[in-house]
């Protein structure tokens, strides 16, 4: 590979990494708006069609061609080979194989897992133009691919091209969110390793999702290993208790009765939150309530909170306040090595069953690899 070609590959890689990180972060925001929200909905529909096409090669062509156009606007994004012999013609295979393929591999092969997509039959032509439509088995998606690249090339706007590329990345992110993540749970895990990996996982802000996931997984482990509970229920993070019909974030059931309520807070527990939950629990005749507050009781509320807890004990309610790691440490000792492996496995399953963000699922998979 010549120095000029190496430099272009590096520029494409840097541009892709920068935009992927930015778009991934923005896509998690409730205020996120699609880059092409103000453009024709047909264009976005065609992008989705290309990325989900039965013809796997097209999954790679679209991001490759538009990425090249973003980094070098003078190129013709319809060109697949230098043999196209038109102004702006270039060989796109190098960028596909050196930039997009590694990106695909790093992201759970969301594009299809091809190692050399540009050597496949659909791309054995100089350019994505109507002239080569006849040799395509999947003519409909070839037309979709050509239509997206045509509008990018014809407008020749750097800003528009970048918006199209951002939309492509957003759609890839959405496909990735539905992709299966493999959790490499180890065959054995020490107490220290289990506590450390959970600490690292829950240290990242997630709107409470990560903390609730590990909490639910721990109680599922208690249920499966000790038989203390028959069923563990967890509501979707940020769902109101009254709307979900649940009394708390996690409910532990035994013999058809609600045995324990578990309220999870990834911040401090305020007196207002405590009062509201205890009033609701008393109304439902629930006597066992555990608050797992990562930062304890709100400063200044400690005395009043303790007084409220004592009053509730006198009325028949048992209230416990701890943080997750302190509570979990003793349980993980009792679970033993096999039980700790079960616990780590439950975390992955809980992430999947609750459809947690791909960011959290990938983070957990990555942490498991570190053991």
Image: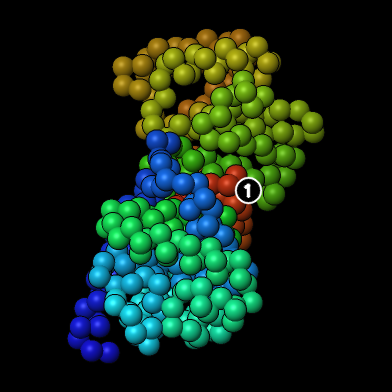
Q: Residue at x 63, y 13 (%)?
A: 282
In the displayed structure, 198 sits above or below 249; it is below
Foreground pick, 162 / 186: 162
Q: Residue at x 56, y 49 (%)?
A: 351
In the displayed structure, 229 sits above or below 365; it is above
The residue labelled by disc 1 is 353
- The answer to which image quadrant residue 207 occupies is top left
Foreground pick, 28 / 341: 28
Q: Position of residue 44 (x, y in %)?
A: 49, 52
Q: Position of residue 305 (x, y in %)?
A: 43, 16
Q: Residues within 10 Å of mark 1 (few under 14, many from 20)?
A: few
- The answer to which image quadrant residue 7 occupies is bottom left
Q: Residue at x 24, y 82 (%)?
A: 6
Q: Is residue 106 visible?
A: no
Q: Position of residue 187 (x, y in %)?
A: 57, 68
- The answer to which image quadrant residue 136 occupies is bottom right
Foreground pick, 15 / 217: 15
């Amino acid at each position: 590979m010549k120095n000029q070609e190496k430099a272009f590959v590096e520029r494409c890689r840097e541009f892709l990494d920068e935009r992927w990180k930015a778009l991934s972060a923005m896509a998690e925001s409730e205020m996120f708006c699609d880059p092409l929200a103000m453009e024709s909905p047909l264009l976005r529909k065609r992008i989705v069609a290309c990325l989900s096409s039965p013809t796997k090669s097209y999954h790679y062509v679209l991001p490759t061609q538009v990425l090249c156009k973003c980094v070098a606007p003078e190129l013709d994004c319809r060109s697949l080979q230098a043999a196209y012999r038109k102004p702006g013609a270039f060989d796109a295979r190098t960028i596909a194989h050196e930039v997009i393929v590694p990106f695909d591999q790093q992201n759970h092969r969301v594009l299809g897992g091809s190692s050399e997509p540009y050597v496949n039959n659909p791309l054995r032509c100089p350019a994505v133009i109507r002239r080569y439509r006849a040799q395509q088995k999947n003519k409909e998606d070839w037309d979709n691919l050509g239509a997206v690249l045509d509008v990018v090339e014809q407008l020749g706007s750097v800003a528009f091209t970048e918006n199209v590329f951002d939309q492509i990345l957003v759609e890839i992110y959405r496909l990735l969110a539905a992709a299966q993540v493999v959790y490499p749970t180890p065959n054995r895990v020490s107490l220290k390793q289990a506590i450390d990996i959970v600490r690292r996982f829950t240290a990242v802000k997630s709107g409470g999702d990560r903390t609730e996931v590990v909490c639910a997984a721990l109680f599922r482990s208690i249920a499966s290993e000790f038989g203390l509970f028959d069923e563990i229920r967890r509501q979707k993070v940020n769902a109101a208790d009254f709307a979900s019909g649940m009394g708390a974030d996690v409910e532990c059931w035994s013999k058809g009765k609600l045995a324990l309520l578990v309220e999870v807070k990834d911040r401090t527990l305020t007196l207002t939150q405590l009062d509201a939950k205890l009033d609701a629990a008393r109304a439902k005749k629930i006597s066992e309530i555990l608050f797992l507050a990562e930062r304890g009781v709100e400063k200044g509320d400690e005395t009043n909170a303790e007084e409220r807890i004592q009053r509730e004990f006198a009325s028949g309610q048992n209230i416990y306040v701890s943080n997750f790691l302190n509570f979990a440490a003793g349980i993980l000792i009792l679970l033993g090595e096999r039980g700790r492996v079960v616990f780590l496995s439950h975390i992955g399953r809980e992430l999947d069953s609750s459809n947690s963000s791909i960011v959290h699922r990938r983070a957990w998979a990555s942490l498991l690899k570190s053991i």
